[in-house]
Image: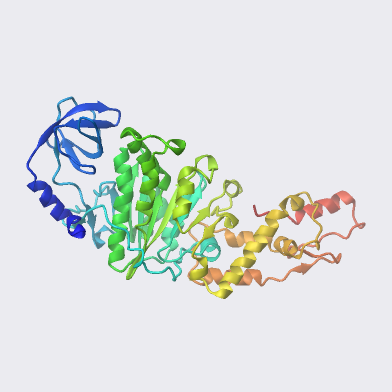
């Protein structure tokens, strides 16, 4: 019965069959309006004023009647403005005709393409997959980014967060994934983005080739909070439709933080008491409702990649901390790497995939552990290496990390237009770790391939120290 009532056509007919009741606006404060004499419920769409009027959504129930927020501008609204329940609440267009299209947060085309009115429309709300009927994550999802495919491997149906501060390369990483992924369809939600960046991202970062098998949903930062919030659910609903057609979908949202900020605006305007850092309790309940809708089904999957814009590079801010507790892993981007011109800025040691063991074989896991061990050893000895105080031979793992440093750095770096086919990244990692160390002819360990430390006593001490320091050039963070 519940599935019948969620059908938008039936809901529209039921709304149309309601007795026509008109209320009136009795209060407008900040982002909200209050209506008197209208029997509206939470979530109902209402239209204020004469045709076309302003569309709004009921977000709370006040002492004198329902309280709503607009999906447009309230400019010109007056006390006494008529309000009625809108029987034609907007649905979400679905169909293969959406590929290559750019929609706004209400599901209306932003581009110059044909109208979508003839397509089927579904309700924006849907239930997440039943926990006992979700398909297990057992197949790898190739993303085309070496550092991810080998060291933070992603599985079909996994949900993963991309955690970073501003200006560290989140959008660039998403564009690399869209170009290099083996997913059938990509659905990209740009939530709260700067208007200047939308066209630049679509035309430059995404490009015509990436757009051909993608659907883009855009809600810029100047749009009402309800539109920004709805855009995330519209993109998720479109991804769900493609999953129901048996497609493997990448759902990418930039950013989950701005979605949470939109809910913060809505909650505070509706009268909720602020909690951690001003976020209302409803935000912490809404995040899992959105994130749990991604995942694998019997015949299709949604792999969710959600960027999280952490405040002040604090990875434990409320949104980031809550997202990590729900998602199946996270990728941390480093401002330090960005300042060195190292892209993508993936901090491998701080990134985790909870399904890595399920989507890789024993040999791949061995390679993954070995490279992570080298990165960890180099990080621990970094200070000694930088000042030239590390003595080769003191630790074989550090010796090998120093010897392979340049090759590891080259492996982790990748240009925007570079894509490795499935399997190629793993082969490159095998070749890298098969590189032999070069013995230090002083009898004390290993140094980078192609470099030899000086024999003490043959040159002045200052030059010996300079040569020692040179062995750590190009350090990995």
Q: Residue at x 33, y 49 (%)?
A: 232
Q: Residue at x 53, y 39 (%)?
A: 312
In screen coordinates, is 430 left or right of 403? left
The N terminus is located in which quarter? bottom left
Expressed as whole percent of the image width and height from the top left, the position of residue 353 reads 51, 61
Q: Is residue 175 above or below residue 142?
A: above
Of residue 396 and residue 118, the one placed in the foreground of this image is 396
Quadrant assignment, res 97: bottom left
Quadrant assignment, res 211: bottom left
In screen coordinates, is 90 left or right of 304? left
Q: Is residue 326 above or below residue 436?
A: above
In the rendered view, how is the structure colored? rainbow
User: Residue reaching furthest top?
Assistant: 79
Of residue 467 and residue 265, the one placed in the foreground of this image is 265
Of residue 111 and residue 23, the one placed in the foreground of this image is 23
Q: Residue at x 32, y 55 (%)?
A: 236
């Amino acid at each position: 019965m519940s599935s019948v009532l969620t059908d938008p056509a039936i809901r529209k007919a039921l709304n149309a069959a309601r007795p026509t009741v008109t209320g009136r606006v009795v209060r407008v404060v900040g982002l909200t309006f209050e209506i008197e004499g209208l029997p509206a419920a939470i979530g109902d769409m209402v239209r204020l004023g004469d045709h076309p009027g302003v569309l709004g959504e009921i977000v709370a129930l006040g002492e004198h009647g329902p309280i709503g927020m607009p999906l447009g501008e309230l400019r010109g609204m007056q006390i006494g403005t008529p309000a009625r329940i809108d029987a034609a609440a907007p649905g979400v267009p679905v169909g293969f005709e959406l590929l290559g299209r750019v929609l706004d947060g209400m599901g209306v085309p932003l581009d110059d393409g044909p109208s979508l009115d003839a397509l089927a429309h579904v309700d924006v709300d849907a239930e997440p997959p039943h926990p006992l009927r979700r398909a297990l994550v057992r197949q790898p999802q190739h993303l085309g980014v070496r550092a991810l495919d080998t060291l933070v491997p992603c599985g079909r149906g996994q949900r993963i967060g991309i955690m970073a501060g501003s200006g560290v390369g989140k959008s660039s990483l998403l564009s690399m994934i869209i170009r290099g992924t083996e997913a059938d369809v990509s659905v990209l939600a740009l939530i709260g983005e700067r208007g200047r960046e939308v066209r630049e991202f679509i035309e430059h970062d995404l490009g015509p080739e990436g757009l051909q098998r993608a659907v883009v949903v855009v809600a810029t930062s100047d749009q009402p909070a309800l539109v920004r919030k709805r855009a995330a659910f519209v993109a998720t609903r479109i991804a769900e439709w493609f999953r129901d057609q048996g497609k493997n979908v990448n759902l990418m949202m930039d950013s989950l933080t701005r979605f949470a900020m939109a809910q913060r605006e809505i909650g505070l305007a509706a009268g909720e008491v602020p909690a951690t850092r001003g976020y209302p309790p409803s935000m912490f309940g809404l995040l899992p409702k959105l994130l749990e809708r991604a995942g694998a089904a019997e015949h299709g999957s949604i792999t969710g990649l959600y960027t999280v814009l952490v405040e002040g590079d604090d990875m434990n801010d409320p949104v980031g901390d809550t997202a990590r507790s729900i998602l199946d892993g996270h990728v941390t981007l480093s401002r330090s790497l960005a300042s060195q011109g190292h892209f993508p800025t993936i901090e491998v040691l701080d990134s985790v995939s909870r399904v890595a063991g399920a989507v890789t074989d024993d040999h791949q896991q061995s390679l993954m552990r070995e490279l992570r061990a080298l990165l960890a050893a180099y990080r621990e000895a970094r200070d000694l290496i930088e000042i030239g105080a590390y003595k080769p031979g003191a630790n074989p793992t550090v010796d090998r990390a120093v010897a392979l440093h340049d090759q590891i750095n080259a492996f982790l770096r990748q240009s925007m237009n570079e894509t490795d086919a499935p399997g190629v990244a793993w082969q490159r990692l095998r070749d890298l770790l098969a590189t032999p160390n070069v013995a230090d002819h002083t009898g004390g360990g290993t140094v980078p391939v192609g470099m030899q430390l000086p024999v003490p006593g043959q040159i002045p001490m200052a030059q010996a120290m300079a040569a020692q320091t040179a062995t750590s050039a190009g350090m990995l963070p």
